[in-house]
Amino acid sequence: MKRKVNIDREKPSAEEIRSRKDFQSVLKEYSATAGSGVSSKPFLKSTGFLIGALISLVAAIAVLSYSKFSSKTTGSSVVSESKQDLSPEGVVQVPISQDEQSGTRKIIAPPLKNVDVPFQEYKLNASKGGEFTSKNGSTIHVPQNAFADAQGNILQGEVDLRFREFRDPVDFFVSGIPMSYDSAGKKYQFESGGMVEVTGYKDSKPIQIASGKKVDVRLMSVSSGRSYNLYKLDTASGNWVYIGKDVAREKTKAEIRKQPAAEIKKNDTRQFESRPEIVEIDKKLEEAVQLRDKAIAQLQALPSAPLKPQKANPMRHRFNIDVDSAEFPEMKQYKSMVFEVGTEPENKEFSSDMYKTTWDDIQLAEGSKKGINYCLTLKKGLETKKVIVYPVFVGKEYQAALKNFNSRSEAYNSLKDQNTENEKKIRRDCDSRLADLKRQREKKEAAWKEEQNVLSASKQHSALADSLTGSPLEREVVRSFSLSHFGIYNCDCPIALPAGAEISIRVTDEAGKDLGSASLYLVDKKINGLFKYYSKAYTSFQFDPGSKNMAWTVVGGKMYVIREMEFSKLHTSGQDVLHMTAINREFKDAAEIRSFLGI
């Protein structure tokens, strides 16, 4: 720029420390390592001194590494969550799945992209607590002052409680939560009476259940009986931890009679949203908004509003500076201006002696008030002075600048008014189109809701009739238990793998192309569970030929299925091929999968 200057880690809790004292494992590891080849001769006299030293060093590192690993993976939930002794199967090892795309080992690995069991979210005052009812009729009771932050401080104000339920094999499948385990070398399967996950947040940060407090859950279950245990999934180590027994009871006939229709079957708006005519209306609504926004964006852009010129104060000092308008475009509207020194509070360093100095360099930059004042920096050797200045006009120059400003303001306001009118017209036209489309949508939704109300009333009448006659299909069971920690809890009855048939299988598509080593999911419709076979188990695929079975797998994000009819034709011994049919569609949620598979 050409310038001319003219003169004028939180600490661990006691529970965590106790739960991680697994010294027996360390000693066992040390014994196995120390006995793996170290010479029995005195150490310093051994001919293999260097080798022995190396082996000893490796053994020490192994002990330390094992101890460190054990401290990270041993869960503390057994001590803190149950005062009962663990049953023989108290801690059971969950097989850890491996993500097919990344190869990363995960405890919980949903097999389908963007499909999972969603959380239901509830907001409550932490100080007051509250009780909520889920879409399936389960209830969650929260006492007063039940939540704390990571440091254990009791929380107040609004918190978010997130709750989701897993009720059938499709829920278990899409969630990726493991439902099987090995115990004493034998494979078992969880037949579920219901599974839940409960978490909490405040201001998007995880919280915990406060010490000494419990959140009560009354879970609506599809299974009766008292043979179910309560387990908690330790997501750090992959262990299902035995908590104890839940309390199960069937709803009385009086309770079922009092149950409102909305609890038996609530309208699922997702069915309405997925209707083709509604999808088409929603598409037109979105297109109308996009066209509106595009038309508004194409209106003539407004230039910067002109700045009113300021008249010079004869009592203040001034600088005359040639300014490069390319660097400061707002200066184009100023001609014959000078820069006036601001008042004393802004310019404590200014003095009239600055006019007596021949400065080596001078720089101009924006000041604290954009477009109104500027910062003038004067340099000479190591000395630097900063002065706040304002563009002003003197005498006749001010009158000429004011006349120019009025003319520019008139043009600017005219263009602004025109743009405003054009934008209003665009919005009026669009709003008329949007209102018409919304009326169409509301009319269709009202008709659909009326259909659903009639259907719901019919189902309620049927359910009530069945309950009074003792129909086991409509029997409702409530399972109650208390949580002292957030997490995943399962009311389960351990069962063995299905029996009756055991074969070696190969899994292919309809054309006979091998589908590789993906996991295979087996559903036996007599059991509310999901059997998951890894590729290594293909040589020993077990099922009950006397039951209704179906199976599916996921390869490259696509599901393949073998339904009951084809499954019933499988051999019961030897070898066979599972010819899987590709499902050429993407599912939005578990409900769509459940409907498609007929589960």
Image (cartoon, rainbow, N blue to C red):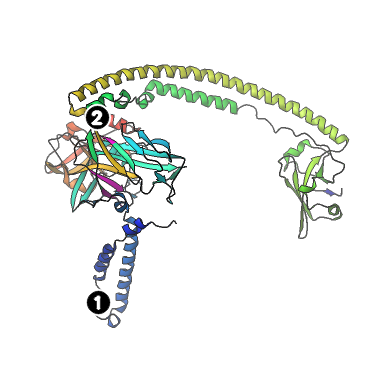
Region in magenta: 219-242
Residue 476 position, x and y percent, is 23, 31
- Of 340 and 5, nearer the camera is 340
Asked if residue 542 is among those painted magenta in the image, a careful observer would answer no
The quadrant of the picture occupied by the C terminus is top left
- The residue wearing badge 1 is 39
Amino acid tagged 2: Gly
Residue 283 position, x and y percent, is 45, 24
Residue 131 vs 484, above or below: the answer is above
At a point 67% along the width and 30% down the height, the residue shown is 302
The local secondary structure at tag 1 comes to loop
Amino acid tagged 1: Ser
- The residue wearing badge 2 is 598
Tell me, for residue 124, which label it has, or none. none
The quadrant where residue 220 appears: top left
- Marks 2/1 in contact by CB < 8 Å: the verdict is no
The Cα atoms of the two marked residues, 2 and 1, are separated by 66 Å
